[in-house]
Amino acid sequence: MFLLSSLTIIMSLSDKTKKAMEEVGLGSYEIKVYISLLENGSMAASEISKKSNVPYSKIYEVLNSLEERGWIESNSSRPQKFFPNSPQTATETTRTLIEKKMDSNNELIIQELMPIYEKTGIKERPEIWVVMGLFNIANKVQEIIQNCKKELLIALPQGAENIVGIIQSTLRTLSEKGVKIAVLVSENTSKETILTISRVAEVRVKNNMFGGGVIGDINQVVILLGNGRNEKGSVEPIAIWADHIGLTGFAKEYFSYLWSDASSK
């Protein structure tokens, strides 16, 4: 009779819920015991064994495991009774325990393995891509700008003014968030463009500026290289996008050099 009862309880669980309970670390016996307690309230170990169809030889091992994880509690009565915590309490306790375990494991792993990683000189492979076409370059520039949190450096060479209209609203949003924005423009940049940019950024003019680019938080950089030929032979703008710390650092140093030699507007 109790076998049928146990099967009915387990079958009443949706597959998604059963799988979710398994993924947070519960075994099939633990699930059966917890559901039995939810259905029947506090019970002694022998009753739980009968209701859940978990062998009595295993019942205390299962109960102890559930109690350690915060799914159930027990009292000191004779015989000892076990009762379920709410699913919310149980899952929150499980999450806390998992987070503590992860923090402890992370600390141990990093402490022991980082010296090996640093000693061998292995570096995480950076991404470097060639980007062709004004639309694609503008998308990459927009991506860098949108992800920027602290500092945005932009060098706009002659002929790149059309990008300003594309990124203007995003620049305004960053400025309102307190992001530091510095923009270098060439001496041939129109007064209208300079005025538009100066509303959201500090602007300086650099004579004979070669090339250009965008640097976001020293994490990513787009370097404008001028024009090149695509696979079809057509001439269009070409740029390099990278998240290489060495390349972005070099780009910032070069920008700082140009900035110091430029005139304010």
Image (cartoon, grey):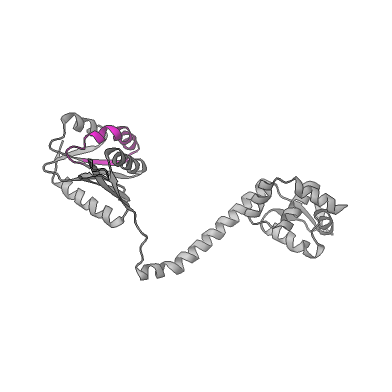
Find residue 121 and report its horizontal and vertical position in percent: 34, 68
Q: Is residue 41 visible?
A: no
58 vs 69, nearest the viewer: 58
Horizontal arrangement in the rendering, residue 257 relative to residue 132 (left or right): left
Residue visible at 15% across and 46% down? 210
Horizontal arrangement in the rendering, residue 116 relative to residue 86 (left or right): left
Residue most toward the right? 1
Number of disc labels:
0
Residue visible at 68% across and 47% down? 15
82 vs 174, nearest the viewer: 174
Residue 157 lies within the magenta run: yes
Horizontal arrangement in the rendering, residue 263 relative to residue 136 (left or right): left
Taking 124 as reference, is 255 above or below it?
A: above
Find residue 212 and report its horizontal and vertical position in percent: 21, 44
Res 25 → quadrant: bottom right
Horizontal arrangement in the rendering, residue 134 relative to residue 90 (left or right): left
Res 144 → quadrant: top left
Residue most toward the front? 232
Residue 84 lies within the magenta run: no
Q: In which quarter of the image is the C terminus?
A: top left
Find residue 79 and report its horizontal and vertical position in percent: 84, 59
149 vs 158, nearest the viewer: 158
Taking 34 as reference, is 135 above or below it?
A: above
Find residue 227 and report its horizontal and vertical position in percent: 20, 43
Magenta-colored span: 156-183
Residue most toward the top? 192
Q: Can residue 184 be seen in this view?
A: yes
Residue visible at 45% across and 64% down? 110
